[in-house]
Image (cartoon, rainbow, N blue to C red):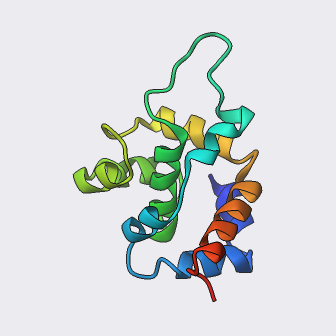
Amino acid sequence: MSNTSATLQDVASVDDFLNAAATETVPLFEHLEFEFLLEYDVFAPSKRGRTRVHQPPDLFRGFLHCYYKNIYGTRPVARELKHGLVWYYCGLDKPPSRDTIDRFLTDLEHVVDDVFDRLVEQAAARGLLD
C-alpha cells in the first residue's frame, strides 16, 4: 500500500479528484461507476479457482474512502472497513479480512494509475471537477 499512496500523492488530477469529494466519499460513489475494474486481468478469478468474497469495485470504494481519510496500510484499512456503516456504504456484504485487502491492494498497484485516469475522466465528464 505504501507504494500506491506514494505514487498517487503527487498527482494533481488525483488531488483534484479527491477534493471533489470534499464532504464525504459516499456522495461521490453515487456519481461514479466502478464496474470497469472488472475489465482488468489482475482482478480476474484465479486459475486455481479461488473466488472473491468481495468484488473489486466494492473494495476500491473502501480503498478510496480510506485514502480520502488519510488511512494507509493494510491493517489501518482493515480497521476502518470494520466500521458498520463504512463497509456497508462501500457496497461490501461484510468487512473484508486483512488478507483480502492485502491481495486487492497488491493487484491494484499494477493498474492504479490507469484506474485513477479513468475515474478522473468520469468525474470531469460529470462536471465534478473544475
Residue in front for this viewpoint, 34 or 51: 34
Give the percent coordinates (x, y) of residue 16: 63, 81
Q: Assign the C terminus to one quadrant of the image.
A: bottom right
Residue placed furthest toward the top: 48
Residue drawn at x 67%, y 70% as measured from the top left = 120
Question: Taking 97 as reference, is 45 left or right?
Answer: right
Who's the residue at 39% across and 80% down the image?
Answer: 23
Residue drawn at the location 49% of the way across and 36% of the way down: 55
Query: Does the rendering let one see residue 113?
Result: yes
Residue 74 makes an appearance in the image: no
Q: Quadrant of residue 5?
A: bottom right
How many labels, in total? 0
Looking at this rendering, what residue extends furthest in the left direction?
84
Is residue 2 left or right of 85 when viewed as pictured?
right
Left or right: 36, with 87 as reference point: right
User: What residue appears at the point 65 percent right and 73 percent down from the top-left corner?
Assistant: 125
Residue 7 placement: quadrant: bottom right
Q: Position of residue 96 (x, y in %)?
A: 39, 38
Most extreme residue toward the bottom is 130
Judge from the rendering whether residue 65 lies leftward or rightward of residue 102; answer left or right.
left
Q: Position of residue 69 (x, y in %)?
A: 44, 70
